[in-house]
Image (cartoon, rainbow, N blue to C red):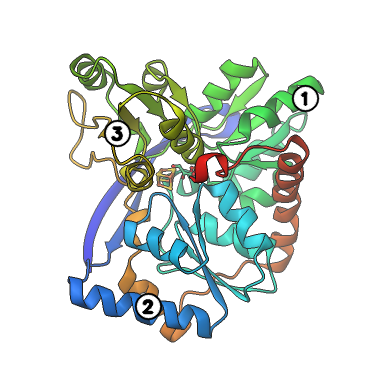
Amino acid sequence: MQKKLISIPYDHPGAGNQSACSTAQAWASQPRDPQPEEKAALIERIKRMLKEQDAVLVAHYYVNSDLQDLAEATGGYVSDSLDMAKFGNEHPARTIVVAGVRFMGETAKILNPEKRVLMPDLEANCSLDLGCPADEFVAFCDAHPDRTVVVYANTSAAVKARADWMVTSSIALPIVKHLKEQGKKILWAPDRHLGRYIQEQTDADMLLWQGSCVVHDEFKMNALEEMMAAHPTAKVLVHPESPRSIVALADVVGSTTQLINASQKMDAQEFIVATDNGILHKMRTLSPHKLFLEAPTRGYGANCISCNHCPWMAMNGLLNLAEVLEKGHNEIHVDRAVGERAKVSIQRMLDFARQINLPGKNLGNA
Ligand code: 13P
Ligand code: SF4
């Protein structure tokens, strides 16, 4: 295992809504990539164990491409965080193995408390989740009782338990529009960039927690403009966790599934992609004749940890997946009472998605 110390800066609203700046640290341990012969044997072993244990593998687009392929080859699923939650909830398997980050495993457990939910590494977290501690968040909500609390999926079960609604990037816009139409004022957490983007699109009254994603925060406007000038016909695909200066240059802004759908549907032959580079595997598989470039994270203002890959998503690998299935380690547990309260905000989102018939990854088989 390779260990990498990562320093995560984040701001959050403190008492009196003043900004406080903190630093969180996370040890990201990335499993080594097995050699080709070892890999083939591991994949066969994992396939067998999934079947024997009535388990299904649900992966996010940002994880290692071997895991994405394995999920699909074994009747599992690869998608964005909304569709992962829906799939896990509807699939009959007794065990759900989530290859992604902690909040995805917790969401699966909250929706399916009777099932066993495993993850290759329980330390796989997210800077948005880490930057929104439940006690501070509850105090923030208590200070603004007139607001409807909307939280992003990238939060702990305890934060979701204090929320009225949970949203993901694929459905945040229609849900906030709907709340605005009902005259609601919103308290939004934790991603400030996504919150600001939704606020600008809907003109809703939104009070924002000041969290951010360590990956998307690193995209650099000037370097992106240079890349666009060098590739004048390229379309720019941007995840809304990116800063405003990056969103302003986008042809398409959307969740991971929405960006993949766009990369398939659009006529362009070249794309610049401003999100985690794990997504390129699916884009390239679906459109092998198109060119996909990673939006730059290096350039003026970059720091030494700049890259396009989430350190926590990178903690998922074939080796720790096999080990978890073999030993039954790394089961997700969520306190029952917290889970029941959190489920209300998640279920509200799932019901809303069904009502509006939100297009998922079916568009073009993403
Ligand atoms: P999606 O819901 O768009 O997959 O995003 C999840 C995420 O963590 C992006 O950084
Ligand atoms: Fe969290 Fe960013 Fe990683 Fe997504 S890419 S899981 S938002 S740290």
Q: Position of residue 10 (x, y in %)?
A: 40, 37
Residue placed most toward the observer, 166 or 147: 166
Q: Is residue 230 above or below residue 305?
A: above
In the orientation shown, which residue stands out farthest toward the right? 182
- Residue receiving disc 2: 322
Q: Nearer the viewer, mark 3 or mark 2?
A: 3
Residue 305 x/y as whole percent: 22, 42
- The residue lying toward the viewer, choosing from 35 and 150, is 35
Q: Which residue is mark 3?
A: 290
Up-down relation of residue 324 to residue 10 (above or below): below
Using the image as rendered, state which of residue 26 and residue 297 is in the foreground.
297
The nearer-to-camera label among 1 and 2 is 2
Q: Nearer the viewer, mark 1 or mark 3?
A: 3
Q: Residues within 10 Å of mark 2 (few under 14, many from 20)?
A: some
Q: Residues within 10 Å of mark 3 (few under 14, many from 20)?
A: some
Amino acid identity at mark 3: Lys
Three-letter code for the amino acid on which mark 1 is drawn: Lys
Q: Quadrant of residue 269?
A: top left
Q: Which residue is mark 1?
A: 184
- Residue type indicated by callout 2: Ala
228 left or right of 251 in image: left
Q: Distance of mark 3 from mark 2, alpha carbons?
A: 34 Å
Spatial distance from mark 1 to mark 2, Cα to Cα? 47 Å
- Name which residue lies at 48% across and 45% down: 366
Looking at the image, residue 66 sits to the left or right of residue 1; the answer is right
Q: Are marks 1 and 3 in contact (CB under 8 Å)?
A: no
| Residue at disc 3, secondary structure | loop
Q: Residue 62: where, in percent of width, then height?
A: 38, 49
Q: Residue at x 42, y 85 (%)?
A: 326
Looking at the image, tell me whether mark 1 or mark 3 is earlier in sequence order: 1
